[in-house]
Amino acid sequence: MSTVTLTAKGTHELYLEAYNVTPDAFAGKTADEIAGLECHEGNRKGKLGEYFDIDGNGGETAADTQIIVKGNCKKIKRIGQQMTAGEIIVESDCDMYTAGWMKGGKVTVKGNVDSFCGIGMAGGEFIVEGNAQNYLGSAYRGDWRGMTGGLIHVKGNAGNDVATFMRGGKIIIDGDAFLHVCTHGEGGTVVIKGNVESRVGGQMVKGDIYVYGQIKYMMPGFKYVDDVEAEAVEGEKLTFAHYIGDLGERHSKRKGEIIYGNIYLKK
Amino acid sequence: MPKVIKNVGCPYCGACCDDVEVTVSDDGKRVLEVKNVCAIGTQIFMHGGDHDGRIKLPRMRQPDGTMKDVSFKEAIDFTAKTLLKAKKPLMYGFGSTNCEGHAAAARVMERAGGCLDNCASICHGSSFLAIFDNGYPSCTLGEVKNRADVIVYWGSNPAHAHPRHMSRYAIFPRGFFTGKGHKSRTVIVIDPRFTDTGRVADYYLQVRQGHDYELFDAFRMVCHGHADDIPDVVANIPKETILEVAEVMKNARFCNFFYGMGLCHSDGRNHNIDIAISLTRDLNEFTKCTIMAMRGHYNITGPGAVWSWQFGFPYCLDLTKKTMVHMNPGETSSVDLAMRDEIDAFINIGTDAGAHFPIPAVQHLKKHPFITIDPSRNMASEISDLHVPVKICGVDDGGIVYRMDNVPIQYRKVVDAPAGVPSDEEFLDAVYERMVELEGEGFI
Amino acid sequence: MSDYIIKNGFVFDPLTGIKGDKKDIGIKDGKIVEASEVKGGKTIDASGKTVMAGGVDIHTHCVGPKVNVGRLMRPEDKLFRSRTKVGNTRVEMGFSVPSTFATGYAYARMGYSFLNEAAMPPLHAPHVHEEIRDTPIVDIAAMPVMGNNWFQLEYLKNRELENNAAYTAWLLNATKGFGIKCVNPGGTEAWGWGMNCTTIHDPVPYFDITPAEIVKGQMETNELLGLPHCLHVHPNNLGNPGNYTTTLDTLKLAEGIKPNNKFGRDVVLHNTHLQFHSYDGTTWADFESGSKKVMDYVNAHDNISFDVGFVTLDETTTMTADGPFEFHLNRLNNLKWANTDVELETAAGIVPYVYDKNIKVCDIQWAIGLELALLAKDHMRCHLTTDHPNAGPFTRYPRVIKWLMSKKARDDLLHSFKWSEKVIAATQLESMDRELSLYEIAQMTRAGPAKCMGISNMYGSLKEGTNANIAIYDINPEKMPKDPELIEKAFSETAYTFKDGVMVVENGVVIATTPKYTVWTDVKVKENAIVERDIHEKFAKYYSVGLENYKVFDEHMHNPRAIEVDATN
Ligand code: SF4
Ligand SMILES: [Zn+2]
């Protein structure tokens, strides 16, 4: 595993779009070559070297490339976008689309992330030690294929629209979420250890939502069926009140039985 | 002799009434009288033409803070240079611009590599998000007039915002299959406030503010055979009422939902519309059902149409890459861009961002060059570095506008603008030419 | 404007009967001339290359309201799926429903010069013309959608052909339209009430007329007027197993009707996207190809033509004036659904659709399209389309050409399907050895459509005097490539495209634009007081826009090129 260390110089006036900060783009490149990779500040096409000090060479493949990003990345977008393997560690906050459309590998952000992070995720692991804003693990506008695989773990809170159009994979939020969880969901699992305001599972076709805290307003389309014991997160066996829904939405049948979406509310 | 011009479109609201009669003065410079137009439409016509109150030259801010008249040539030059210098300029507005103007603006911003957005961003933008996710089963207003026997106004108050909507299209007109007019229709109004529109309703449902989504879900449960599972009260509406109204919708011959800002602006905005679309679809299992946004300005549908065919996106366009276009409201929407301080030059066109944007957003924008293109003074023009007056589309300029149902209406010029005042299109085309002159090639 | 001589190319021009001969072509003042007439022009070396007239697309949804709803409602069709633009063109966005700029450039890169927009809702005509203005390079005509129009339903029910003809002429003029398009006759009006007409004898609710009467009446109207194009029909019951019977019933309506026109057209009915109408079986479970049954009839009747609507096995966006069909499709795939019913006239539905090669039904649809073209005896009457974007985007035409010209290419794909055995059992494609020639491809893609639309004096041919629209493909008929991929590549990006004598594409790159024209049909008819009164009445009572604002203003029509028709006697 080779490590490339980027240190943000803070030379960007506006937001920087660092879509090439991925193990895939760095693999097989020397520090100098990495410095020559493209990025955008508004309409100015720049080079990573203008905005970062770069130390170390990429590994042979993405899988054996690790990237550590230091300095203030609060105004840097698209780190880890579309990566397929390898690892990125961002030591500060960072902005939108972090780990967007990620297919594999691991991204860890030590601070907070903004909106649209982990959007359209298909695989890999995305860990946020702080908070995430809106549209975490959601689908891009208009796409009915939201998150399809992988794991997102936010240790703080998340905003609105978590996991819209989710089809697979898992999202764990240790804190709270606000409006809309798994809207239009068609699979996958979301675990919220804190509270949620409302609209959990609206228009949901399939999938599982676990809430450890309160749901302030439950959707009318969810109906209590029974109490179950389940392990939403490994090693945490708990008892939940089990609701099915959204009864206002279409549902498919498997072996003659209707498949609903599920909300499990901790007892 | 004063001249009467018929079949004129009203440049005020999205109902785009095109039966207005305008009497203009001998010299073609002033509107004397307008007929068939409601009160709010009349005002606009009176602003047009060549008269004392009209701003006839661009005004540029001087180092001492005052505004001074400059030539259009200087204004064009300043605008072109501002755009070329910026890394991420934003052009926003288009509430009162014709489609020719939208196309010209698109060419300018594509050349500049900036962001391009329209007022939908702060009003019906949530409709677009819902359309992206769930489609848009709609129809033209004439379909409603000729066929619809159940009309639902949800979170919209046409009595105030679109005064002739009910009489021309929705409730009162006698259409082909609705020969009895109002008598052949059932009207349902759903709104947290009891409005003047509520007065004509056969059913008025006072939904709890911010809980429309739940009420839609309950209606959908009826469609999906889960009426029994509906809680006793949803969003303040008793179960019996929900069941009764659901039956009215299901038994309609043709049902149409008109929704407005009440849905677009309350919590979880786009999802309210999204689920309304789902309900519309569900109802098509039982009858015919369509849905339509009550778009505000007379041509606010226009930029969405033009930019969709030019770029594939109706609003919130980020053209900064120059080789492709990106759109993602929440990021590339004007207010978000301004609030996050992503922008380094701003052009306010055919609207008043000064009045409509949150104060911190305006403060961020004000740090950079700020230009207003608009026929009249407004809050934005008064804080601008440059204010460029232009023709008023629909009064002293013609052009195509799109009604709320996406039907193109060809507007007519009724009076002459003051000499030398360009249309939005003419001004923007000149800016484009100047940019090309200053810096390299234009598009082939 | 430069003049050119295109030297030493292999020329394929079915309208003049040239079948791959080496021949020089001259371009002078934007027109094709005898090579010897060009003095001092530039020389283009086309040796080892194929020269054809600019392509002519007889059925594409490239501009207009429903195309635009398709663009608007599918941001994901742009995400990571657009072409990164090169050079100094406008940006090109979208895959299945490209932006206007992307559309014009992509057609030009494939060597096309004329498009027939297949469905213009009359009420939205100004919108269609705005999009035409913004679609670079290619000339465009648009067919107003009729067949569910209240005026016509009433006239045809009463068999008032003269009145129907007068109204049709008025409508072409008002919308600046090209010909008569008929979509799901009667069924789309029924959709106004959420219903449909699935056979040609289902009565239309309230109007008390049948699809058969509509189609027959419209065909007669078309020939009464002597329009350049024949009636262009999308029959009832599209996309359903067993629908080939409805198709045959519709085609039979043309029996005994003779073409009447001065444009060299000899068919009276064009069945569009025949692939969607050639289905056998009774359900999706026993779904199979009905191509042979349909083609036996088509081959034996020379007053009908068709385009195929090849399924290309892509993720695409379906859009048609067949409103009930789109609703039905949406119920099958549960993706987003847009619908636009247009007062007194028509409707439209839009649904994204994934033709997945791992789904048996999609593969059978793919095979049916190819079978139709391989069974055809006369490719002047069999045209290449994908019903863009319904069965696939038009940018896949080169791939379709590859499949038609190479048995290996289609067999490789056929055998790679997950359910290939089932697909083979439900179709006959595997047993078909035919490989189409470049001449037949030229018939399908330019000569045939141009003749069928009555525009072969301007488009689709290299005859002297026609517009210098020329495509030069990097493919050598004497040394056809072993690798079928090279066929696809050659047709994807021309070596050169000329439009009205201007070199607009060189080595697959758009290098210039040129004024492009809007082609429409200007029909003169005798004054008709009844029709005039009817028009005034319907506008006063039922339309939501004024009559004077309905007719496209001259200033909203861009570079008009009118085809004059005198039907006053
Ligand atoms: S309803 Fe709207 S468009 Fe009609 S006259 Fe009033 S303001 Fe004008
Ligand atoms: Zn079609």
Image (spheres, rainbow, N blue to C red):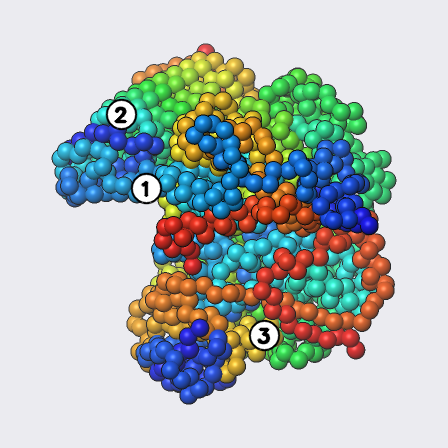
Which secondary structure lies at badge 2? Answer: loop
Q: Is residue C94 shown above or below B354?
A: below
Q: Chain of mark 1?
A: A
State the residue at coordinates (64%, 47%). Answer: B397
Return the residue nearer the eye: B343 or A104: B343
State the residue at coordinates (15%, 41%). Answer: A32
Q: Is residue C308 shown above or below C477?
A: above
Whether ligand 1 has any atom under 8 Å from the Cβ at mark 2 is answered as no
Q: Can residue A152 be seen in the rendering of this structure?
A: no
Left or right relative to C277: residue C536: right
Residue hosting label 3: C455
Left or right relative to C313: residue C530: right
Between the C-alphas of marks 1 and 3, the distance is 48 Å
Return the residue nearer the eye: C497 or C29: C29
State the residue at coordinates (50%, 83%). Answer: C464
Mark 1 or mark 2: which comes first in sequence? 1
The residue positioned farthest toward the bottom in the image shown: C36
Q: In the picture, residue A266 is in which quadrant?
A: top left
Q: Please, what is the three-letter code of the amino acid marked with disc 3?
A: Ile
Which secondary structure lies at badge 1? Answer: strand
Whether ligand 2 has any atom under 8 Å from the Cβ at mark 3 is answered as no
Using the rendered image, report if marks 1 and 2 lie on a common chain.
yes
Q: Is residue C329 shown above or below B43?
A: below
Which secondary structure lies at badge 3? Answer: loop
State the residue at coordinates (64%, 38%). Answer: B54
Between the C-alphas of marks 3 and 2, the distance is 65 Å
Q: In the picture, residue A137 is in which quadrant?
A: top left
Residue hosting label 1: A44
